Image: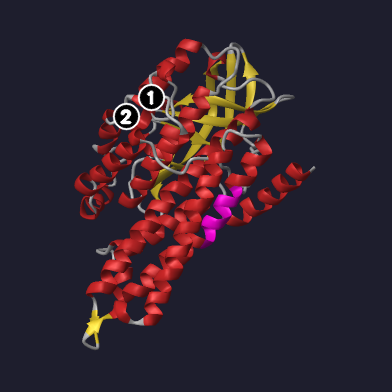
Amino acid sequence: MDFNLSEEQQMLRDAANRYVREQYGFEARRRLQAAGSASTPHWAQYAEMGWLGLGIPEAFGGLGCSFVETALVAEELGRALALEPFIGCAVLAARLVETADAPVFAAHRRVELLEAIAGGALQIALAHSEPASRYELDAASTTARAEGEGFVIEGTKLMIPGALGADHFIVSARVADEGLALFLVDRSAATLHGYPLIDGTLAADLELRSVFVAADARLTAPGAGLATLEEALDRAALAQVAEALGCMEAVLETSSEYLKTRQQFGQPIGRFQALQHRMSEMFVEVQETRSILYRGIASLDGAPAARRQAVSAAKVLLASSARFVGGQGIQLHGGIGLTDEYPIGHYYKRLLALTTLYGDGDWHLGRFVEAQLETAS
């Protein structure tokens, strides 16, 4: 794998970094968070710059880029503590629509949805987690029973990031004698209960009470739902690692600047060796996260077992490195690090959220071991 960015990739990173610095500063982000709105003016800008279509094939209205480009943008959005559901919609939902293989799912409908996502006109969110699922993909109790020319869906979904701004949901449900399947459900057919998460982003629970969907709303063929969902979630989890990497880099840079300017005993506290050691340890954690992200990207299109192993390894490392870097950032800043007016505490909260979405460290550790045994055999 070539670790050097191409000229186009470097231009994309520079443009994203410039946008974050000029248009998405910390105070601007705090104002958006305080407003509590599910929509922000940045989403249209993301579409205009092509970010929402990076991973969507050109035939479906996207740019057809590799996952590297998606990771670059996710990393810069991590620096900004972006509130928009870039990963949930442009990475996860878009991938599920792209790979939908149900015979009744019309090709023109796929093009229509993906073009709308890439153009910023449509947001779709995955509704999968349930009260007793504990990250297990095949533990859905929501059901979809065949009725007339379609299906009736019954169930409850929990903690859906970006749900309040979504136009449609991709709902996982169990079909009798077939297993897990995915369905496209219109927002108007479901009942939402919204709330803010610890990091300031918005989520919601979804109630589906005898919701009827037409047969062509089914996205996955019989027996294919679980594999399709797992592959898309792995992409989203890896994009999250990239976003968390951007958060950790911002913590490292902010802490370094603070140590250079904060005076104690007549000198900058950055001259104290104990604090230099902490900064060194934080730097190592950040670089280890970047390395394992590269490994995950290299394995993303490989065999399923190798992909699962690489993605889960990245999430396991993230669970420890994110807490360490974020926690040390607060420690180095002292009391000011806990205030709402200073960014360090917000980065820590975002890192905590990223370590738990799409599987926490303990769950991914078990999955990593299973994938490793599968690969060895």
Q: Amino acid at mark 1?
A: Leu
Q: Is residue 39 above or below residue 22?
A: above
Q: Give the quarter of the image for residue 329.
A: bottom left
Q: Give the quarter of the image for residue 311.
A: top right
- Magenta region includes residue 173: no
Are the residues flagged by discs 1 and 2 in contact, CB closer than 8 Å?
A: yes
Q: Position of residue 335 (x, y in %)?
A: 31, 75
Residue at 33 percent of width and 46 percent of height:
82
Q: Is residue 83 above or below residue 218?
A: below
- Please name the residue that numbered disc 1 is placed on: 63
Q: Position of residue 376 (x, y in %)?
A: 77, 45
Residue at 30 percent of width and 50 percent of height:
80
Q: Which range of residues does the magenta coloring cover? A: 312-320
Q: Earlier in the sequence, mark 1 or mark 2?
A: 2
- Please name the residue that numbered disc 2 is placed on: 50
Q: Is residue 135 visible?
A: no
Q: Position of residue 375 (x, y in %)?
A: 73, 42
Q: Amino acid at mark 2?
A: Gly
Q: Position of residue 167 (x, y in %)?
A: 39, 28
